Amino acid sequence: MGGPTSIPVADVMTASREMLQKQLYAIFTRPANGIGPVLERMEEHLAFQVSLEKDGILYAAGPMWTDAEDAWEGEGLVVVRAGSREEAIKIAERDPMHKSGARAFTVRPWMINEGSVTLRLDCSSQTFTLI
């Protein structure tokens, strides 16, 4: 009736062998006890995120809105460069949000295959824009 619910990673790698295959890790973070404790730890959390960015670990991060796109309930997504899921978990555990119990998290391996990034660099003004 249903068929398989998953296939081996090796099969995906073979099927996408001509693509980027950039392995990253997505940390889905959510409030553990409402938004209050999240707001209390925000300054420390953002400083931690900036340190990850400066160390070349942080790929991307930011808040996740509600489905109606009109509110924030304290959820976020953090994408990191790591050698394994276990290493990504250790990175997430260092976040003040998680250390304090303000947020809980899950980590999922994520491989980039498709997409594009466009950067415009204006030399005369020494400015750039992500498009």
Image (cartoon, grey):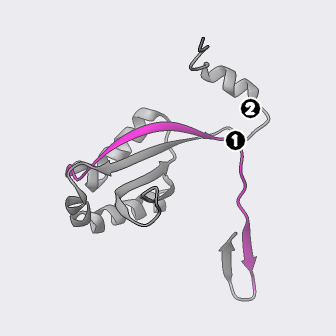
Q: Are marks 2 and 1 in contact (CB under 8 Å)?
A: yes
Q: Going by the image, does 48 lie left or right of 80?
A: left
| First in sequence: mark 2 vs mark 1 | 2
Nearer to me, 52 or 63: 63
Nearer to me, 5 or 59: 5
What span is in magenta? 100-123
Image mark for residue 113: 1
Task: Answer above or below: position of 79 versus 107.
Answer: below
Residue at 44 percent across and 52 percent down: it is 77
Q: Amino acid at mark 1?
A: Asn
- Mark 2 element type: loop
Count neighbours of disc 2 (C-alpha within 10 A) and say few if under 14, some if 14 to 19, many if 20 or more: few
Residue at 71 percent across and 51 percent down: it is 115
Residue 6: x percent and y percent?
A: 58, 20
Does residue 108 belong to the magenta stretch? yes
Which residue reaches farthest front?
Answer: 1
Residue 73: x percent and y percent?
A: 33, 59
Quadrant containing the C terminus in the rendered view: bottom right
Q: Which residue is mark 2?
A: 16
Image mark for residue 31: none
Residue at 48 percent across and 34 percent down: it is 84
Count neighbours of disc 1 (C-alpha within 10 A) and say few if under 14, some if 14 to 19, many if 20 or more: some
Residue 46: x percent and y percent?
A: 36, 65
Nearer to me, 23 or 38: 38
Does residue 92 belong to the magenta stretch? no
Nearer to me, 22 or 32: 32
Residue 80: x percent and y percent?
A: 49, 48
Q: Going by the image, does 111 lie left or right of 96?
A: right
Which residue reaches farthest right?
Answer: 18
Q: CA distance from mark 2 to mark 1?
A: 7 Å
Residue at 42 percent across and 58 percent down: it is 66
Q: Amino acid at mark 2?
A: Ser
